[in-house]
Amino acid sequence: MHLEGQVAIITGGAKGIGKAISEALLKEKVKVYIFDVDEVEMERVQERFNKEFGEGSTVCLKCDVTSQADFENAVNEVFKKQNRLDILCNNAGIPPTSCKVKKLIDTNLTSVIRGTLLALKYMDINNGGNGGNIIQMGSMSGLSYHPFHCEYTATKHGIIGFTKGFAKEASKRGVRMNVMCPSCVDTDLLKAVTDKDPVMKQAVDAMGVQTVDIVSKGFMQLLHDEEKVGEVMRITVQNGIDFHTFPEEPIPV
């Protein structure tokens, strides 16, 4: 897939996985819009990327993805300036220890659904769009379960269910939807959990921690493979990048 000249939105893109994905896209000459709430980090990353990849290559917009108005206005601004939207990565997320359940679900799951539906308005080939790619940031927590941080796990299961269920409908509109499920990644989010939870730290130490670079590599692989629709990419220390298969048949409709 030829990416040069395309326009991407990365939510939660000012640091961690989102920042690494943004950098990978910039290397392929994609125009990158970063949505985040951390203004300090956004200023830093925009200055660095524009210096490295050219002035205006990266634009950071303050956007609270839990707000319908915020998210909609930010996406509208991107389209107004670029007249196209090709790539959305719903990456924004928060750790289970940092907030109440409602905010956790709003940030980690509802915003993914919200962002997908907003992007589809502009990508839809039946509505004058050029098609595109939507890649959700799930987690290996969405493919398993354990007796702690169940609310967080539920949001990641929800992302997978939504993506797999909606992928065929999106493909009719020229949009490929897929989801990535990395295991433990060296980010501030992981540290926020392990610093406060010794049980989680023990589990993380046993699984091993991988870098954001391997996740961005998986993202680009998924973006370039035009055969992937509704797929669940796993990224683990033990097995690297592979895909999860679901043997059960979908519910008849």
Image (tube, helix red, strand yellow):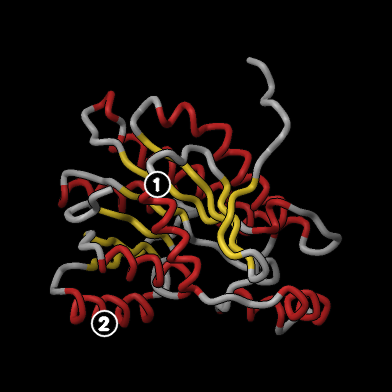
Q: Could you tell me which residue is drawn at 63 percent across and 75 percent down?
A: 190
Residue under label 2: 48
Q: Is residue 241 left or right of residue 154?
A: left
The one nearer the camera, 34 or 136, is 136
Q: Could you tell me which residue is drawn at 69 percent across and 22 percent down?
A: 251
Count of number-bearing discs: 2
On the image, the x and y values in percent for residue 47 come to 24, 81
Residue 208: mark: none
Nearer-N-terminus badge (2/1): 2
In the image as oriented, which residue stretches furthest toward the top? Answer: 253
On the image, the x and y values in percent for residue 70 come to 38, 53
Q: Is residue 190 left or right of residue 30?
A: right
On the image, the x and y values in percent for residue 17 come to 47, 69
* Mark 2 Cα-neighbour bin, 10 Å: few <14, some 14–19, many ≥20: some
Q: Secondary structure at mark 2?
A: helix
- Which amino acid type is shown beneath numbered disc 1? Asp
- Above or below: residue 50 compared with residue 33: below
Q: Could you tell me which residue is drawn at 31 percent across and 53 percent down?
A: 74
Residue under label 1: 225
- Above or below: residue 247 compared with residue 178: above
Q: Could you tell me which residue is drawn at 71 percent across and 84 percent down?
A: 195
On the image, the x and y values in percent for residue 160 come to 61, 44
- Which amino acid type is shown beneath numbered disc 2? Arg
